Image (cartoon, rainbow, N blue to C red):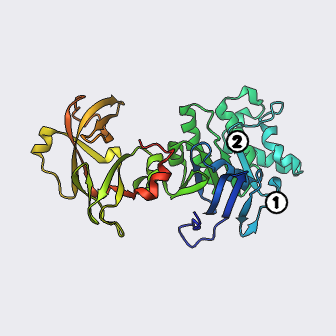
Amino acid sequence: MSAVLKTSDDQAPLVSLRNLNKHYGDFAAVDNINLDIRDGEFLTFLGSSGSGKSTTLSMLAGFETPTSGEILVNGQSLVKVPPHKRDIGMVFQRYSLFPHLDVRANIAFPLTIRKLAAADIEKRVDAMLKLVQLEPFAHRRPAQLSGGQQQRVAIARALVYEPRILLMDEPLGALDKKLREDLQDELRHLHRRLGITIVYVTHDQEEAMRLSQRIAIFSHGRIVGLGTGSDLYQAPPNAFVASFLGNSNFLRATALNAQQVMFEQQPLHVPAQAGRHTGQQVLLMVRPEQAQLLSVEQASEVPLPAGSNEISARVEEVVFLGDSLTYSLVTAGGSRLSLKALSVAATVQATGSEVRVRWQVAHTCVYHDWDDSDLLKGAGSH
């Protein structure tokens, strides 16, 4: 990807990554990344293990040296600036707290090594304790704190010297689900109050969606999707992003014309797209919650709405998930689909029954096989 992924307005970026590469021998951990990060935004790097997200963060922090390329903050190069002079805070999954120091001393540590006046240190630490709601625990040692409390100490320590940028590498990965969600809410509120720029790394899609103003999706050292969670989910730029962010149904088809494709010997309507030609292999994507499941009888009684498609399938499995039902379906040609319906509104279709699947043409994303087959490798169509 050579084009620069710019901010969406005229605001000058705080951080710019330009043609950034990191090679380990012949392996490209980061492959020619170009990215602008806005001042004050919450940006998440999302990807699976080995996708390049943490290596990119480490280069921004100064813990890794780029093989080539540039890292700019306010237009000034950081490539040769050591980590402690970058005005960048860092929070890791392992809290890295000093076990022999209490909470107050742990938070004060970055100020102590910068030799600030004692009164200034006390004032800033008091403010941080209040911010992360740990005032009653100021004199406890890390071993006397819960995992969530220790993580809040780590966040306070990273914020206390007022860095302009805060980097967070899987900071909540070791916590249980409920505590993760509570701390995600706290982080989001903290960001709103402070207005600091946060770059966050995670492999958790839901966490990225809950926290971020924008998400950069990584694959094989490249950024393959960049935008708000809503934009990336509703209109994924490629099949990899569609597969990686949320659940997706992929149907292989052949283009008949600009607005129709042939799927298993049945013509379907698709959104028009310039450059599509007859005979071209395409990939259709429909989200599980955007399709409707009807019995054969229901489908015969309710006419197909204008601007919709319908295909036949058989129910292989029904999974009850409390508020929803998930159906696993298979078509006559062997294509597999997953559909999601609210359990309170759904008429349960029995395993083995023949059904009809309907969806609006406008809810179909169309990708060219030759554009996306490489990206899909390792993503898993699901």
- Residue 363 in the figure: left or right of residue 312: right
Say whether marks 1 and 2 touch (CB < 8 Å): no
Tell me, for residue 92, which label it has, or none.
Answer: 2
Amino acid type at circle 2 is: Phe
Tell me, for residue 178, which label it has, or none.
Answer: none
Determine which quarter of the picture holds residue 169: top right
Dot 2 surroundings within 10 Å: few (below 14), some, or many (20 or more)?
some
| Residue visible at 82% across and 60% down in the picture | 81
Closer to us: 34 or 86: 34
Element assignment for label 1:
loop
Q: Specify whether residue 144 is in view.
A: yes
- Furthest toward the bottom, the residue is 10
The image shows residue 161 at horizontal and vertical percentages of 78, 52
Relative height, residue 152 to residue 42 (above, below)? above
Element assignment for label 2:
strand
The image shows residue 241 at horizontal and vertical percentages of 47, 52
C-alpha gap between disc 1 and disc 2: 21 Å
For marks 1 and 2 on the same chain, the one whose residue lies earlier in the sequence: 1
- Residue 65 in the figure: left or right of residue 316: right
Relative height, residue 114 to residue 256 (above, below)? above
Closer to us: 198 or 62: 62
The image shows residue 70 at horizontal and vertical percentages of 72, 64
Relative height, residue 223 to residue 101 (above, below)? below
Residue receiving disc 1:
81
Closer to us: 150 or 305: 305
The N terminus is located in which quarter? Answer: bottom right
The C terminus is located in which quarter? Answer: top left
- Furthest toward the top, the residue is 144
Amino acid type at circle 1 is: Val
Q: Specify whether residue 127 is in view.
A: no
| Residue visible at 53% across and 56% down in the picture | 224
